[in-house]
Structure formats: C-alpha cells, structure tokens
Amino acid sequence: MQKIPFHIISGFLGSGKTTFLKRIIDQYSGEKKIGIIQNEFAPANIDGVELQKSGKDFNLLEINNGSVFCVCLLGDFVHSLEKFIDEYRPDNIIIEASGLSDTTSISEVISAGRLAEKIYLASNWCIIDAQNFAKVGPMKQRVSHQIRMADVIVVNKTDLVGNEMETIKNEVRKANPFAEIKETTYCDIDFELGNRAINKFYFSDVKTMASPEINSMVIKNGRKMSRKALQQFLNEWAPKAYRIKGFVNLTKGKTAAVQCTFDSIKIVEMENDFRPTELVAISTEFTLREWNRSFKAYC
C-alpha cells in the first residue's frame, strides 16, 4: 500500500481552522478522495455538523473529549485511524487538531505501530488569530508549541489589526524561524495536497505538555430562548471563555448559530433549521454547573 499524505491543521480556539478546512474541501472534493479527522477538546463536535452541511464528498472521523496528541487518547486514536484508513482508503488525510492540542508529540502518532507503514507527515499548518494573538493568557505556551511544530504559519484575520502585524510576525519567528509565514483574511489562501518541504527540525528539546487545567463543557437541552436573552447570556459569559460555539433553540421556531471568541460574539439566525440546543464552552473561569444554571435562567 502506498503511504498516504497526512496533513495537520492546528491553531488556537477560534483562529479559523474550520474555515480553512472548508476551503480545502471546496477545492479538492470530487478531485481527491479526502479523509477528514476532526478533534474536539469538548465532549461535542459542533464543527463536524457544519462540515457535513456543505454537501461535499469526504469521509469524516470525529474524536471528541480531549486532544488526540495527548498520551491519554493516543492509543485509541491510532487504532481509530488505522480502521479509518482500511475502511475508506483516502488519497489524503487532513486532521483539524483541537485548539488546545500540543502537537509536539506528532512523531509518536506518525511512527506508531502499523501507521508508520500507512501514512507520512506531508504538511503541518498552524493558524494564528491575529486579532486575539495577545489574549491567550495561560495558553500561550501551548500556542507556542503549535507554532514550533508547523511548516507554514497562517496569520489570519489580518484585516482586524494594524501596526501589530510586525509584532506578531516577530513573535512567530522567535518560536519558529524556519516556517513560512502567510498573511490572510478568512483563511483565503491556497493549500496544496501534495508534499511540502517538511521541516526536519522538530524541536526535540521541547517536552509534550500535560493536559491543560481547563473546563470543557457542553449544554444540551430543548429549552427555547429569545434572541435578546441569548445576546444577554453571551454578553455575560463570552468574555470569560476562550471559545463558545454551537446552536441555540430560539423562540418562534428558529435556531441560532453561535460563534464567540473572547468578547467577539456572532449570532446568525437560521431559517427552517430547527435543532435542540447544543452549546460548547471552553474556559478556565467557570464550571458547567454555573454556566448551565445561568442558561436556564435566561430561558
């Protein structure tokens, strides 16, 4: 069996990884047999729903509730990936890593068991949110590890920053002087499913980080909320979270798609697309119990 190119897309929460992945699928669906792996740190995968709604042709493997690069999930991930390859025989595999991934252990994945005979690392991309690059707080070291392992650094949302761009690029170069840096908005850049010139300098002195002390939580219920109440709820909680995303069941038979990155809140009402509430939050500042109690109070 010819080895399959394995591509990594990493980046902190809300940086634009799923947008980038959608562009790749739009570009290559029908031309290549694509295998997509979505790894969500939270117990539910909202982005997987969005990808499947595209109607494009690809095979999807979802692995939730932790990072596949963590030793606690590594064995299960390797087994699931082997099974996925044997079943679908994709031409290329692209993994959208959890925003909290520490990708320094990628060599352990690539060389694990029979996977070493089936895949090879073809490219490693890291998406950076230019607008919120300085706001990651205690997760900065984890972001730095993602940058260090990448071959291409995509600085996204450049339209939302001004003179800060040079500072951001200088920070990136300090962490990884060998990566190619691309500037973009809405991740509108070309992606080649061929083999890039991969960096062989994998920062062997960098030790894999332990799982972050962070709360990953999901609200699932059939309660309805008004648009105004939803806005008030998110105004209260989004500034305390790294990421909030998902769908909320609104009154009048509507559903709202929600995307929050720090204090940036986006709500889009979706006609004729009713679904129960499934809302994911990742934060160090509140617990599921607090968040769920507040949600019910707004309903």
Image (spheres, rainbow, N blue to C red):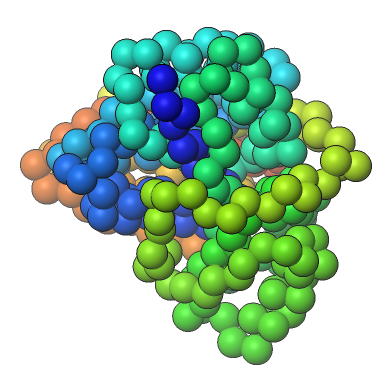
Q: Is residue 89 left or right of residue 200?
A: left
Who's the residue at 37% across and 13% down the image? Answer: 86
Residue 128: quarter of image = bottom right
Q: Residue furthest front?
A: 2
Which residue is rendered at x = 58% and y = 48% of the image?
124
Residue placed farthest to the bottom in the image? 163
- The reply to whether residue 14 is in sight is no
Judge whether residue 146 can be spotted in this image. yes
Q: Report whether 261 appears left or right of 266.
A: right
Residue 194, position as x, y percentages in the image: 42, 50
Image quarter hosting the N terminus = top left
Location of residue 20 in the rendering, given as x and y in whole percent from the top left corner = 40, 55
The spot of residue 181 in percent (x, y) is 60, 70
Residue 193 in the image, given as x and y percentages of width and height: 39, 49
Front one among 39 and 151: 151
**Near-viewer residue (239 or 80):** 80
State the residue in front, 185 or 220: 185
Q: Residue at x 62, y 12 (%)?
A: 113
Residue sitting at 26 percent across and 41 percent down?
32
In this rendering, would 174 be left or right of 119? right
Relative depth, front residue between 136 and 109: 109
**Could you tell me how many numbered marks the image carries?**
0
Q: Is residue 161 left or right of residue 225?
A: right
